Amino acid sequence: MGVMTSTLWHGFADMGAVSASGPFAIASGSGTRITDTHGTEYIDATAGLWFTNVGHGRASIADAVAQQLRTVAHVSGFGDVMPAVTVELADRLGGLAPIPGSKVFFTSGGSDSVDSAAKLARRYWHEMGRPGKTMIVGRTKAYHGMHVAGTALSGLPPNREGYGTLMTDAATVDFDDAKSLLGLIERVGADSIAAFFCEPVIGAGGIYPPPDGYLSEVRDICREHDVLFVADEVVTGFGRIGGAWFASSRFDLQPDMMTTAKGLTSGYVPMGALFVAPHVAEPFFSGGVWWRHGYTYGGHAGAAAAAMANLDIVESEGLLDEALRLQDDLHTALTPLADLDAVSEVRSGVGAVAGVQLADPSVGPHAVAALRRHGVSTRVAGAGALQVSPALVMTTDEVGEMASRFHAALSGL
């Protein structure tokens, strides 16, 4: 056994390998760069984990959080209580929602948002007099967090292994074929299905943009069969897809619910939010019906202050448009990597996300190590795809620099 170098148990890690090598400990960050404890600087190709949309080291966000914590750090969000800044944030987010009049329910992060949506979908149908509609449906390659419902929805089999059957009424359909969803509905009956969960762009499962027409087709299928359409925008929300605050707005999805987190605060403080369309919220706002669900830190005052400052930056610096510029920059700079023997495909062209697919997925850890030696921090997503999802402040020149380092690292594999 290797010598354990830290008491920390990392998420999604081979701890035997981590214990042998020690953690990749990051000491600081600024803009699109991070620096480790040895003083080595790296381009942060993943923006933390899809979340640092405005870049590292934003003093205005830190100052907003500090000022809020000096005023009141947090109070319970249960019953009729909520920090004033959180009420202000909810109203601001309501104005950005893909469907006017949507309600906003705060959580502590993306996995919370997904589990909240799964529970609310079932409870909604109960209130509508159709309690048999309990099945939740996800897609192959999809990732929806790691709580019970999110794990059951996962289209990544390794994420479900070893836990037994978490939910008997969860199902998976093909990620790229709308007819697969329709086939499931026809087999089990629409009266059994509560909701369909859909990432507009599959993220952790390998970065897969939607096939042409797919999103509108599955949305229409859900509408025609009384299945709630849940857009999982934990990754894509708050500007990453470009041109709009949400992919749901860019693609006119009109979701019944929308899960968010990451870009809400750019990762400066943990926070998530579930957007709920008016017709789904209505039974719970008409009086007398409680949704007995919530989180101690849902709508945390410090997180709300961070979100408000973060949204200010996105607006003042025009980062929704910058994400569209990055969409083109990444596609132009990274596509030539497909000519390398080590690369089988580059997936890009929808927002500030891209996947560099390795021809041999088993060399993923070696590719990540090679990229670190060339000054790039990234990770493997799905089956051997190197994740590229930089901060929305990354310049065209920096994209070119990052692509050159990818080329140098992957040429040596």
Image (cartoon, grey):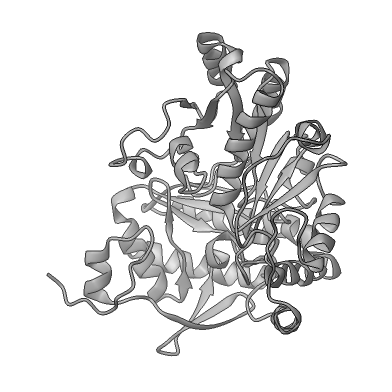
Q: 36 or 263, which lies in front?
A: 263
Q: Position of residue 119 (x, y in %)?
A: 59, 37
Q: Position of residue 37 (x, y in %)?
A: 42, 87
Placement of the N terminus among the 4 image quadrants = bottom left
> Left or right: 260 with respect to 97?
left
Placement of the C terminus among the 4 image quadrants = bottom left
Residue 216, relative to residue 301: is it above or below? above
* Location of residue 181 (image quadrant): top right
Question: At 57% from the left edge and 72% from the top edge, which residue is drawn?
Answer: 401
Question: At 82% from the left edge and 69% from the top edge, which residue is drawn?
Answer: 312
Q: Position of residue 407 (x, y in %)?
A: 46, 64
Q: 153 or 141, which lies in front?
A: 153
Picture mark count:
0
Question: At 49% from the left edge and 44% from the top edge, which residue is drawn?
Answer: 143
Q: 15 or 53, which lies in front?
A: 15
* Location of residue 162 (image quadrant): top left
Residue 207, relative to residue 372: is it above or below? above
Question: At 73% from the left edge and 53% from the top edge, which residue is drawn?
Answer: 79
> Left or right: 178 with respect to 339?
right
> Left or right: 121 with respect to 187?
right
